[in-house]
Structures are given as structure tokens and as C-alpha cells.
Image (tube, rainbow, N blue to C red):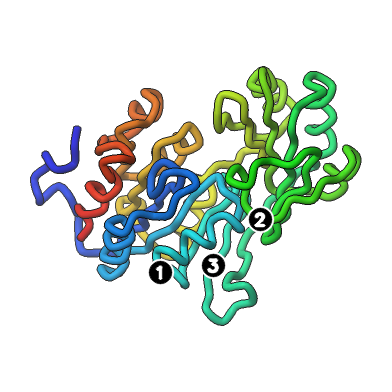
């Protein structure tokens, strides 16, 4: 169902602020590109109505910050690394943010498992606010921040919030990783994001909702990826982008246009 087909009375339930959770890649922008100006305007208009816009992404915090800047968001909350990192943006804070919640896991066993099955697997281990420790460099557009090549032992030297496993056949590791006790999420046909156990964008967004005092009825989320399923299940109003996989659309209450049609604007204008 397209949002434009709804009666105006159904579009906004009441005048209280909403928590508006927005995915980034595939929702606000095409990966590698800037946020389109009409989308920037829509987000700014939603914020002008006193709604709480929270960027919720699989990206690292380093990757989220430039998008927040493009949107003119210098205060408020962001959820990074599929929920492993929650931060508050702040004009007066060092680097423009303050970490509120950081969850980590032991990367060593995960890296060893991946390399034992796929010796050529590419591994990236997130370093919050910096970039990644990697066994081989990724293309610049594939990850955000600096990359530091380290030996295999160095990948698991410190606990981390998120690790990337990439390579042909790597999806075979999804279930073994989950049995090992971490959250493994497919990000592409050859890409797995690994985060701490029992974690998703939704778990961190629920903490943000509670901190802000927003009623559950006033939660609104827009996404397009498999890592958005929990977030869409959590939101009282769940909107899928038109190009989202069928399993994502099945979770959502509503579907809008795809990324080329600026579908997220169709969703946001119901709050303006």
C-alpha cells in the first residue's frame, strides 16, 4: 500500500513527537552518493515539527556522521553498527558526538572460524570513530574511515562492536556464527556483518525511545535491507522502500517508491 493512498486522518496519529528511525544506504541515499537535496529538505521539515529523527544504520559511526552533517543534524541520537553503537550528537562534544552505549564481542574466534573455512575471506574489524583493522584493504567506497592492515592475530586483539566478513560463499557462515553466540546479518550476497549477541537496530532504538519518552505508538521507521527487519517489526509504523526484498516488505505496514523515486520523502511528508 502506498502512503499517498491513506486518508490524512490516518497519516499522523496525534500531535506528540514521533521517533523517526531512518536507514541510510538504500533509503536516504544511494551508497557512495550524497543525500539528495529534496530528501534533506524533507528530513529538516520533519525535525522542524519537533519529531526525533534517528539515523539507524549498519554503517560505523564514522560513516554516519557525514550523513548527519548533510542533513543538518548536529544534535540528537544515532544508532550505528546495526545497533552495537549508540551515540548522541552534540555541537560542543569532542568530534561532535558522545558515546552512550557500546556493545562488543570477542572477534578472535570469529576471525579464526571464518579463515579456517574460507582462507581468502576479507575481514574488517571496526574501530569506533576511526575506521577498521583489516587483513586486506577494502575499496574506499565500501567502508568508512581509515583502514589499518594488521596480521590475523591483530584482528582480534581487542573486543569490537562490529566485524565484516566478505568473500564468495561466506553466507555459509551465517548459522555457524549464530550458534557461536554472535549476531550475524547478511548485508550482501558475499558480505556478513557480525555484532554482539541478541542485538539489532531495534534493541538500541528501544533504548533511545525510552530515554526520549516517546510512546511506542509514535515510533516510525523506514528501511530497505535485511538488517532493517527487526527495526520494522519494532516500529508502530513500518515503511519499506519499493526496491526492498519481499521479506522486508512483508514485515512493513506500508510500501513507498524505490530509491530512484525518493520513496523516503513519500513516507516523511505524512509527518509534516
Q: Nearer the viewer, mark 1 or mark 3?
A: 1
- Describe the element under mark 2 as helix, strand or loop: loop
- Describe the element under mark 3 as helix, strand or loop: strand
Mark 3 or mark 2: name the one nearer the start of the chain. 3
- Describe the element under mark 1 as helix, strand or loop: loop
Q: Quadrant of the C terminus?
A: bottom left
Give the CA distance from mark 1 to mark 3.
14 Å
Q: Residue 6 at x, y = what percent?
A: 12, 42
Viewer-nearest residue: 177 or 261: 261
Q: Residue 200 at x, y = what percent?
A: 55, 42
Viewer-nearest residue: 198 or 31: 31
| Residue drawn at (68%, 30%) of the image | 166
Mark 1 or mark 2: name the one nearer the start of the chain. 1
Determine which of the numbered discs, if any, sits on residue 229 in the image: none
Quarter where residue 102 is shown = bottom right
Viewer-nearest residue: 26 or 6: 26
Q: Nearer the viewer, mark 1 or mark 2?
A: 2
Determine which of the numbered discs, if any, sits on residue 72 in the image: 1
Give the CA distance from mark 1 to mark 2.
21 Å
| Residue drawn at (78%, 38%) of the image | 136
| Residue drawn at (56%, 48%) of the image | 59
Q: Position of 166 compared to 88: left or right?
A: right
Give the CA distance from mark 3 to mark 2.
19 Å
Q: Which residue is mark 3?
A: 88
Mark 1 or mark 3: name the one nearer the start of the chain. 1
Q: Quadrant of the N terminus?
A: top left
In this rendering, is residue 120 above or below 52? above
In this rendering, is residue 126 above or below 177? below
Q: Which residue is mark 2?
A: 145
Amino acid at each position: 500500500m502506498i502512503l499517498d493512498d491513506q486518508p490524512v486522518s490516518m497519516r499522523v496519529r496525534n500531535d506528540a513527537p514521533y521517533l523517526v528511525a531512518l536507514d541510510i544506504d538504500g533509503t536516504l541515499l544511494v551508497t557512495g552518493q550524497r543525500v539528495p537535496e529534496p530528501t534533506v529538505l524533507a528530513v529538516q521539515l520533519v525535525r522542524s515539527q519537533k519529531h526525533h529523527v534517528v539515523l539507524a544504520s549498519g554503517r560505523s559511526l564514522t560513516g554516519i556522521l557525514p550523513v548527519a552533517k548533510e542533513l543538518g543534524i548536529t544534535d540528537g541520537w544515532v544508532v550505528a553498527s546495526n545497533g552495537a553503537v549508540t551515540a548522541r550528537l552534540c555541537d560542543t562534544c569532542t568530534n561532535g558526538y558522545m558515546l552512550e552505549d557500546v556493545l562488543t564481542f570477542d572477534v578472535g574466534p570469529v576471525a579464526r572460524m571464518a579463515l579456517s573455512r574460507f582462507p581468502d575471506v576479507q575481514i574488517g574489524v571496526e574501530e569506533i570513530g576511526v575506521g577498521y583493522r583489516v587483513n586486506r584493504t577494502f575499496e574506499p567506497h565500501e567502508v568508512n574511515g581509515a583502514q589499518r592492515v594488521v596480521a590475523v592475530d591483530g584482528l582480534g586483539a581487542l573486543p569490537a562492536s562490529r566485524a565484516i566478513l566478505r568473500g564468495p560463499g561466506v553466507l555459509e557462515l551465517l548459522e555457524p556464527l549464530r550458534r557461536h553466540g554472535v549476531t550475524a546479518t547478511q548485508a550482501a550476497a558475499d558480505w556478513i556483518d557480525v555484532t554482539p549477541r541478541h542485538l539489532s537496530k531495534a534493541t538500541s532504538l528501544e533504548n533511545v525511545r525510552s530515554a526520549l519518552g516517546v510512546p511506542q505508538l509514535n515510533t516510525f521507521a523506514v528501511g530497505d535491507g535485511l538488517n532493517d527487519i527487526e527495526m520494522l517489526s519494532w516500529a508502530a509504523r513500518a515503511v519499506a522502500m519499493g526496491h526492498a526484498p519481499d521479506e522486508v516488505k512483508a514485515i512493513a505496514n506500508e510500501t513507498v517508491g524505490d530509491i530512484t523515486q525518493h520513496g523516503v520523502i513519500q513516507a516523511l511528508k505524512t509527518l509534516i
